[in-house]
Amino acid sequence: QVRLVESGGGLVQPGGSLRLSCAASGVAFGTYAMSWYRQAPGKERELVAAITSGGFTNYIDSVKGRFTISRDIANYRVYLQMNSLKPEDTAVYYCNARRVVVGTRYDYWGQGTQVTVSS
């Protein structure tokens, strides 16, 4: 059974930092693309950062230079280091694991962790 569990969210002042962690189980971790999405109230869920199975990363423009996605394959974890946080970063952050095998997409989600940036 695939399970993704996020942690590390919380309340932080503008300009502060948080590190989100996602612990994966039940997946061949190194073969999945891992991503962080977020969803703010009244908005659609958006992709924030992703790391492919080959280790390539990409980010949405609004977090480039501030957020860093990384992974620890041996320990089945993916991280999102968030620096210089802004109020507009406030959202529920979700971990995602995705893999496409012979045209079939396998997509798994965590339960989310709340990040609130406020003074």
Image (spheres, rainbow, N blue to C red):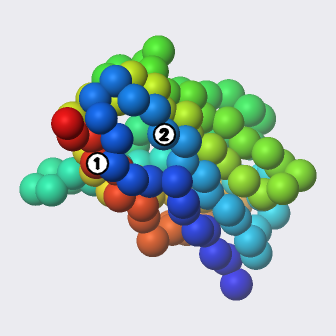
Circle 2 residues within 10 Å: few <14, some 14–19, many ≥20: some
Residue placed furthest toward the left? 42
- Numbered mark located on residue 23 in the image: none
Image coordinates of residue 15 in percent, x first then y, are 34, 24
Q: Which corner quadrant holds the N terminus? A: bottom right
Q: Is residue 19 visible?
A: yes
Q: Which corner quadrant holds the C terminus? A: top left
Q: Earlier in the sequence, mark 2 or mark 1?
A: 2
Residue 37 horizontal side relative to residue 68, left or right: left
* Disc 2, SS: strand
In the rendered image, which quarter is residue 52 located in? top right
Query: Marks 2 and 1: CB-CB under 8 Å?
Result: no
Q: Is residue 24 above or below residue 53?
A: below
Q: Nearer the viewer, residue 68 or 96?
A: 68
Image coordinates of residue 26 in percent, x first then y, are 76, 75
Q: Is residue 3 above or below residue 35?
A: below
Kind of residue at disc 1: Thr
Circle 1 residues within 10 Å: few <14, some 14–19, many ≥20: many
Kind of residue at disc 2: Leu
Residue placed furthest toward the top? 65
Residue 89 horizontal side relative to residue 52, left or right: left
Residue at 49% in and 47% down: 36
Which residue position holds label 1?
116
Which residue position holds label 2?
18
* Disc 1, SS: strand
Q: Is residue 59 visible?
A: no
In the rendered image, which quarter is residue 48 located in? top left
In three-dimensional space, the C-alpha distance between marks 2 and 1, rounded to whole angstroms, equals: 10 Å
